[in-house]
Amino acid sequence: MKKMLFPLRRTIDSGEGLGAEHPASAPVSIDDMTVAYHRRPVLWDIEYDSPEGELIGIVGPNGAGKSTLIKAIMDLVPMAAGRVRIYGEPYTRHRRLVGYVPQRESVDWDFPVNALDVVAMGRYGEIGWCRRVSRSHKDASMAALDRVGMADYARRQISQLSGGQQQRVFLARALAQDAKIYFMDEPLAGVDAATEQAIIALLQDLITGGKTVFVVHHDLQTVADYFSHLILLNMRIVASGPTREVFTEENLRKTYGGKLQLLDEASQALARGGI
Amino acid sequence: MNWMMIDTWTVIAGMLSALSCALLGNFLVLRRMSLMGDAISHAVLPGLAIAFFVTGTRDSFPMFLGASVVGVATAVFTQWISHFGKVEEGAAMGVVFTTLFAIGLILIVHAADHVDLDPGCVLYGTLALTPLNTTTVWGFDVPRVVVSLGAVLALNAITLSLLYKEFKISAFDPDLSTTLGIHSGLMHYLLMGLVAVTTVASFESVGSILVIAMLIVPGAAAFMFTDRLPVMIGLSLVIAVLCAGFGHLGAIVVPGWFGFEGTSTSSAGMMAVVAGLIFVVAVVAAPRYGIVTKFVHRWQISMTILREDILGLIYRLEEHDVTGPTVVPGMLKDAMGVNQLYSKFSLWSLARAGQLRRKDDGAYRITSDGRDSARLLVRSHRLWETYLHHHLHLAPDHVHPTAEQLEHITDARMREELEVDTDQPSKDPHGREIPRT
């Protein structure tokens, strides 16, 4: 029924015969994805195969569809067309392998739960319907809090935490889920410099442990330092691949269009990074 | 006052209904959709009427079914209208439930020619008649309404305790919930279905006003008292019981206060009024978000600032070669525009903290402890002035008011950073000495 609303819809490929060009083992592979809100397309013709065990930055201007891309992969917004595969299978079959860290502003921090409760939510999928959170799940959640240096704040109501601490609680929740692929929506937004470094170290840790991590990121200055791979996005994928190959002035100009101030920033970053 | 068996049954019916509603209300409040309860409780009316037209009876089961379907439909329509019509959710809700309620009223008024479906009883219910229609349970005569309300309470309690963590996560973080396989949309409609069933069961006995009050008030009031969800749910249930008990008591007693001896008013109405009063108490007195708490907190801050300003004042007097300056409450009025009571209190509390010493003539003199605190404060003040002058290029005569505010929130770490950023200055922009620690 929804499809009739989108005149821009393309015919959905049957999916047969595409297996050859898309390696079945790729953590995330996207075929011809189009997403639209109210008939207005926000993402067009997304084709992407991700590498495994890399820290992948998703970069682009406001309204480029960065959050929409990760939400569409996780089936949170409907696709008008296209297909997503997680390790060669539909997302719904590999739900448990995929962890999500939403934007910090997306939840109500006055909610009457403490940090440990929030982290334990990461294990709800594993615990299963109608079951209680057992001792062992609480221990695992506590260990995750400890890993982000927040063990002392386990019993704090979440509104009493600073922005950086809230973000670390969100990360601990993702750790508690123990996924293989993570999608993080601006985990570095509004955190202080020390927390930013701590988070990046943690993400690098995850990569060392064989995880694949996607991070929506805003700050072009730090892109080259943090990410080994990039997706440059502005409704379409402008470029994707290893950072040293795709983080070029030309690609950035294509991604950011006429937004001069950002371009200035970017060219500074390029000069500093010596790329 | 005469308390009879009838009164007991009335209170029990009211309590069961209030408890069922309060349980669900917690999650409505947390999802910021308290008014959805209001909307559904109105919108189920056509469901009731249609069920009646189709079956021709007032049996509970078809009524339940009709109302539940329309209740969930209300939630679905609201979602559609706000999504496709691009209107705010509250407006969408308003459109849906007023329309459905109106349709329901028309149907009922039309039906009223033939049967006893009374629009008035929809609002206030017929709580007083509760004990008259009884049925036998295990050999006891129990009002029919108490049985059905008890069943609904059991349904709500069992569902919420089985799916406690699912309701929690889908209210807190719907997107994450969905990615973990707990579909937040499904949980939403499940909650709305329970609201619809509860509403219908409560309708006939307590009426829609009490249902709406109990869906919103206990949860909202409990939220102000705690930051733990289980405690919040427990408190909301206590509040629900209090409302039912005191509401009925009030309905019997209160009319007497106004000269209507021997009569009583609507119990359901009075229960809702008690709920309102409890909420007012919560708003005023709650430890976390209450008005009193906020007031006390603000007062404490302003007293701290005043005390620090007094120390700063004495320190500056000493700088101006006033030897052994003393302070009396009256001076503060002239120097800072502080009233007598505040001055006295702040001087007294400084003396108690050992920062000032009260002499026999009633004047206060600074102690060495007090001088140390004052020195830090003045140091923060002048470092800030230097910082503002250097980094924000404010003129020296513009930096004082800002520094005056910032000095009170500056701790040791911030002072260190200020020192580094201002290259360890010895004088502030006005040329005054910055005291060393």
Image: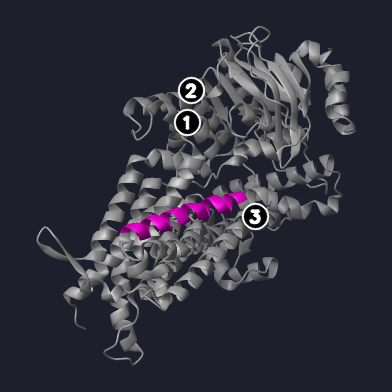
- Position of residue B354 in the picture relative to residue A238 (left or right): left
Identify the main secondary structure in magenta.
Answer: helix
**Residue hosting label 3:** B88
Residue at horizontal 68 percent and vertical 54 percent from the top? B318
Q: Chain of mark 3?
A: B
Q: Point out residue B368 in the picture as x, y percentages from the top left corner.
A: 56, 48
The amino acid marked with disc number 2 is Arg
Q: Amino acid at mark 1?
A: Gly
Marks 3 and 2, how far apart in space?
A: 34 Å
Residue B36 is at least partly visible in this image: yes
Q: Chain of mark 2?
A: A
Q: Which residue is mark 2?
A: A96
Q: CA distance from mark 2 to mark 1?
A: 8 Å
Dot 3: element: loop
| Residue B367 is at least partly visible in this image | no
- The chain that hosts pointer 1 is B
Badges 1 and 3: C-beta atoms under 8 Å apart? no
| Residue at 24% in and 63% down | B146
Q: Is B414 displayed left or right of B277 in the figure? A: right
Along the viewing direction, whichever of B58 and B355 lies nearer the viewer: B58
